Image: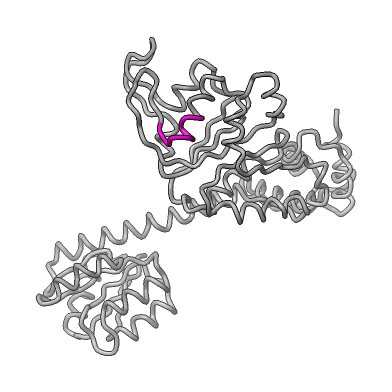
């Protein structure tokens, strides 16, 4: 049920608005406030899906109310109610964040359409917030070891800048998590984050994937297509496993970094791009440079900031926190009751040689939750988590 607050000092107007909304849609719960101060107090104390607010009121005018609500609960859409002489002010309030305005006396269709649109907008805002929290939780960086604390500290300093970052470390250590944290904590977090797994794309297609192509550029190019760099405009592009990128594609990436321009395959036309580049690899790029498999100039362009993610065997003190995190997440995904791990089970997990790193630990925790007892014990670990 949508909850609507009407802030209006004229009792007659309040009664009309309440009557219209209550009779039109039985799912609307309508509350009233006789002035701006009372309205702001109600917003502080209760959850509303929409506020209708008069502009000219004693004690606190509509603009002050709007500014207060935007600070207290910015997700609530505010529709301003304006008299004939208030129209210019009403338009100005939209620049301050009002959703819309309606004139007095209210036109029935105009009022109801505005209310419906505002409530739809509120649902979208709430859903987007929920999804962002879900994404944030999926990419949470868990651990308090010195190595992870050092990485978190670097991210806090580097994320707000546009500095390019190269993330290194073995497979399964969480390089992708570092990249997502860098994006989420950056000024570009409202823009897209586009991920490209360079190892998963055939070498003959990598340039088209990154930079796009024009119709006729090659046999199957039957239409123009934008690449990942264009898709990431205004945001971040994450080039995972960049050590597997072909030398010709490396040359084009280098140009994109130097000039902030790309050109689609088969075209000479330059396209300006505003993209932050974060790259990752499990290879020793300095050795790749010696073997003439990776460009040294591209390495130096990418590695403005270098973040090394350690293997799990070098941060065993984080295993209890990781087990707790994965246990909660897996239970949430699969349903059922969360299983506790005994201290002895945790100690045994800390002794294992985690060649697959975080990814392997997550799989083992899931296996133990599915196959283990109601409480995961040391015996369960020996039975279901032993290395073959």
The image shows residue 193, relative to residue 344, as above or below, that is: above
In-image side of 40 versus 248 (left or right): left
Classified by dominant secondary structure, the portion drawn in magenta counts as helix
Span shown in magenta:
254-261
Please say whether residue 209 is one of the residues in the magenta stretch. Answer: no
Q: On the rendered image, what quadrant is the C terminus found in?
A: top right
Residue 12 in the image: above or below residue 153: below
Horizontally, is 82 left or right of 73 in the view? Answer: left
Q: Residue at x 50, y 29 (%)?
A: 253
- Name the side, left or right, on which 310 lies relative to 59: right
Q: Is residue 312 above or below residue 10?
A: above
Residue 11 figure quarter:
bottom left
Q: Is residue 260 magenta?
A: yes
Q: Quadrant of the N terminus?
A: bottom left
The percent position of residue 313, horizontal first and vertical second, equals 82, 41
Q: Position of residue 369 (x, y in %)?
A: 75, 44
Which residue does the image show at 23% across and 75% down from the upper left? 18
Rendered view: 255 above or below 101:
above
- 64 relative to 184 in the view: left or right: left
Residue at 34% x, 86% y: name it: 37
Query: Residue 280: image x %, image y %?
Result: 62, 35
Query: Is 249 in front, or is 76?
Result: 249
Where is residue 367, by image quadrant? top right
From the viewer's side, name the closer residue of 119 and 149: 149
Q: Residue furthest bottom?
A: 59
């Amino acid at each position: 049920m949508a909850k609507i607050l009407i802030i209006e000092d004229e009792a007659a107007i309040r009664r009309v608005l309440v009557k219209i909304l209550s009779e039109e849609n039985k799912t609307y719960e309508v509350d009233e406030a006789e002035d701006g101060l009372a309205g702001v107090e109600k917003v502080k104390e209760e959850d509303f899906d929409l506020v209708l607010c008069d502009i000219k009121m004693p004690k606190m005018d509509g603009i002050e109310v709007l500014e207060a609500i935007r600070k207290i609960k910015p997700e609530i859409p505010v529709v301003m109610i304006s008299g004939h002489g208030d129209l210019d002010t009403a338009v100005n309030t939209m620049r301050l964040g009002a959703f819309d305005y309606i004139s007095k006396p209210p036109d029935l269709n105009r009022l109801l359409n505005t209310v419906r649109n505002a409530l739809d907008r509120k649902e979208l805002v709430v859903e987007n917030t929920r999804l962002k929290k879900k994404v944030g939780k999926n990419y949470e960086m868990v651990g308090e070891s010195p190595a992870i604390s050092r990485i978190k500290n670097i991210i806090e300093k580097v994320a707000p800048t546009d500095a390019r970052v190269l993330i290194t470390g073995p497979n399964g250590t969480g390089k992708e998590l570092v990249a997502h944290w860098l994006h989420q904590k950056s000024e570009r977090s409202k823009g897209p984050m586009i991920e490209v797994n360079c190892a998963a794309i055939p070498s003959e297609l990598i340039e088209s994937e990154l930079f796009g192509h024009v119709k006729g550029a090659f046999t199957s190019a039957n239409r123009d297509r934008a690449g990942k760099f264009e898709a990431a405009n205004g945001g971040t592009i994450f080039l995972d496993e960049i050590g597997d990128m072909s030398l010709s594609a490396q040359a084009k990436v280098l140009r994109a970094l130097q000039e902030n321009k790309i050109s689609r395959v088969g075209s000479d036309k330059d396209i300006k791009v505003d993209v932050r580049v974060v790259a990752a690899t499990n290879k020793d790029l300095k050795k790749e440079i010696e073997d003439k498999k990776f460009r040294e100039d591209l390495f130096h362009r990418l590695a403005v900031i270098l973040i090394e993610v350690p293997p799990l065997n070098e941060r065993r003190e984080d295993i209890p926190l990781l087990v707790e995190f994965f246990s909660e997440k897996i239970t949430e995904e699969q349903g059922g009751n969360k299983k506790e791990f005994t201290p002895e089970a945790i100690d045994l997990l800390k002794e294992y040689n985690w060649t697959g790193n975080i990814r392997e630990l997550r799989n083992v925790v899931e296996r133990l939750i599915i196959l283990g007892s109601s409480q995961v014990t040391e015996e369960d670990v020996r039975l279901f988590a032993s290395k073959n």
